[in-house]
Image: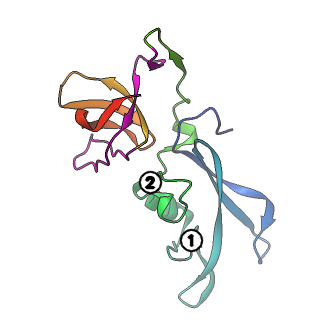
């Protein structure tokens, strides 16, 4: 179900295979990052009380699944899951489709909406609303170059502005 969606698209579902020790359903966080990834949401002890905290890693327990999701909307899963270095960006019900691409005669890869694929040369941390984080080596689609210093693009970390000198044509 996630394959046709952009990286960062996610959903939480009841596990088809497992139930918790108390017979209640266990949950899975499905997230698209290059290919669908599946992360088990555990229910464990919290402050001595059994079965009251949800977590994907024991170091970060949450009282509710909603709190867990809110945390990972702002923080990368990559610290605990190196194969998934992204935040939760789009619940599947609001997710954009995976971009359709083509290769122009120039050899540049183009997004269906007109953007051109670039590769980030350096890391960039967004400092203002409307800016987008970049990680060296990741691909972004440049969709606006109206300002020579700040381009607008979309990529695995969302959509927003970033320094034009931090990317090169792929």
For residue 153, above or below residue 36: above
Q: Which residues are magenta?
A: 107-136
Estimate the x, y position of residue 38 in percent, counting from the top left.
Answer: 66, 54
User: Which of the two labelled residues, at mark 2 and mark 1, occupies the earlier sequence position?
Assistant: 1
Q: Nearer the viewer, residue 125 or 41?
A: 125
Give residue 35's quadrant in the image.
top right
Question: What is the count of numbered marks?
Answer: 2
How crowded pointer 2 is (Cα within 10 Å; few <14, some 14-19, many 20+) is rated as some
For residue 35, above or below residue 151: below
Estimate the x, y position of residue 7 in percent, counting from the top left.
Answer: 53, 40
Q: Nearer the viewer, residue 36 or 118?
A: 118
Q: Nearer the viewer, mark 2 or mark 1?
A: 1
The N terminus sits in image quarter? top right
Which residue does the numbered mark 2 point to in the structure image? 73
- Circle 2 sits in a helix, a strand or a loop, which is it? helix
Q: Nearer the viewer, residue 39 or 110?
A: 110
Which residue does the numbered mark 1 point to in the structure image? 57
Estimate the x, y position of residue 151 in percent, counting from the top left.
Answer: 26, 30
Query: Which residue does the image show at 24% across and 32% down from the upper left?
Result: 164
């Amino acid at each position: 179900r996630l394959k046709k969606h952009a990286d960062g698209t996610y959903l939480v579902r009841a596990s088809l295979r497992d139930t918790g020790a108390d017979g209640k359903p266990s949950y899975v966080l499905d997230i698209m990052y290059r290919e669908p990834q599946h992360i088990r949401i555990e229910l464990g002890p919290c402050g001595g009380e059994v079965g009251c905290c949800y977590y994907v890693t024991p170091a970060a327990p949450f009282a509710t699944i909603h709190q867990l999701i809110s945390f990972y909307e702002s923080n990368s899963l990559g610290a605990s899951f190196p194969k998934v270095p992204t935040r939760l960006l789009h619940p599947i019900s609001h997710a954009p489709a995976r971009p359709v691409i083509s290769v122009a005669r120039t050899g540049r890869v183009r997004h269906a909406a007109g953007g051109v694929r670039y590769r980030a040369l350096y890391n960039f941390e967004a400092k203002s609303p409307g800016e987008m984080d970049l990680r060296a080596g990741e691909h972004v689609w440049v969709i606006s170059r109206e300002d020579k210093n700040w381009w607008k693009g979309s990529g695995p970390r969302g959509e927003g502005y970033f320094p034009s000198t931090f990317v090169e044509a792929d």
